[in-house]
Image (cartoon, helix red, strand yellow):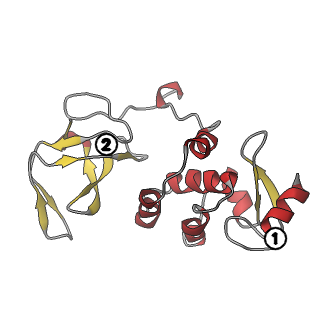
Amino acid sequence: MLDILIQRSENCCELCGDSQSLSAFTLSDEAAVLVCGTCGPQLSGPMIGSKHWYCLQGSIWSEVPAVAALSWRLLNEMKAESWASEALDSVFLDDAVMALANAGQGVDLADEEGAVAVVDCNGSILSDGDAVTLIKDLVVKGANFTAKRGTMVKNIRLGFDPTHVEGRVNKLSIMLKTCFLKRA
């Protein structure tokens, strides 16, 4: 399989383009990505140096399904970073690539032991892609505007903190406290 990956990738990392210490990273039984000595160790451990991962803004557009799927996984892990969130917002992956990206990821939070559900002010469970309504006027610091009560925020994204979600208000991506949100 490594020979096929090297031929496909022109002997460089399919994520960042580096050519040192290449190895195969397996996504599934049929899909693998050629990664360098910088990217490889961080794929199974903690991701350090977010500047290195700016390369994902390009690799997410790869025509190779495995590369696009792995890029989507990594960007999803870093969606708290504004650049990663913008990259995810701008890309569309077909169903086959999304299935590959979600394969073996344990996407369902209810299956994880000790996981805390993200809930709105009424206790309704929120999930990625839901629409919510603001129940209070919220001053957005640093942006010089107030998000008014009743504003609909569509297509929210969950993060690591169950008390916050990310959404777009006035064409600006901001973090919102779930205690000020009601599921629409």
- Relative vertical location of residue 12 with respect to residue 138 in this rendering, above or below: below
Q: Position of residue 22 (x, y in %)?
A: 83, 65
Q: Is residue 98 visible?
A: yes
Circle 2 crowding by C-alpha within 10 Å: few under 14, some 14–19, many from 20: some
Decide: is 42 above or below 18: above
**Distance Cα–Cα, label 1 vs label 2:** 45 Å
Q: Which mark is residue 10?
A: 1
Residue 49 in sight in this render: no
Residue type at numbered disc 1? Glu
Residue 145: x and y in percent read 12, 66
Front residue of 90/153: it is 90
Q: Residue furthest right?
A: 3
**Measured along the vertical axis of the image, is residue 45 above or below residue 105?**
below
Residue 177: x and y, percent? 25, 47
The residue that label 2 is drawn on is: 163
Residue 99 relative to residue 5: left or right: left
What amino acid type should be assigned to the residue bearing mark 2? Answer: Thr
Counting from the top left corner in percent of width and height, residue 49 is at 58, 69
Q: Quadrant of the C terminus?
A: top left
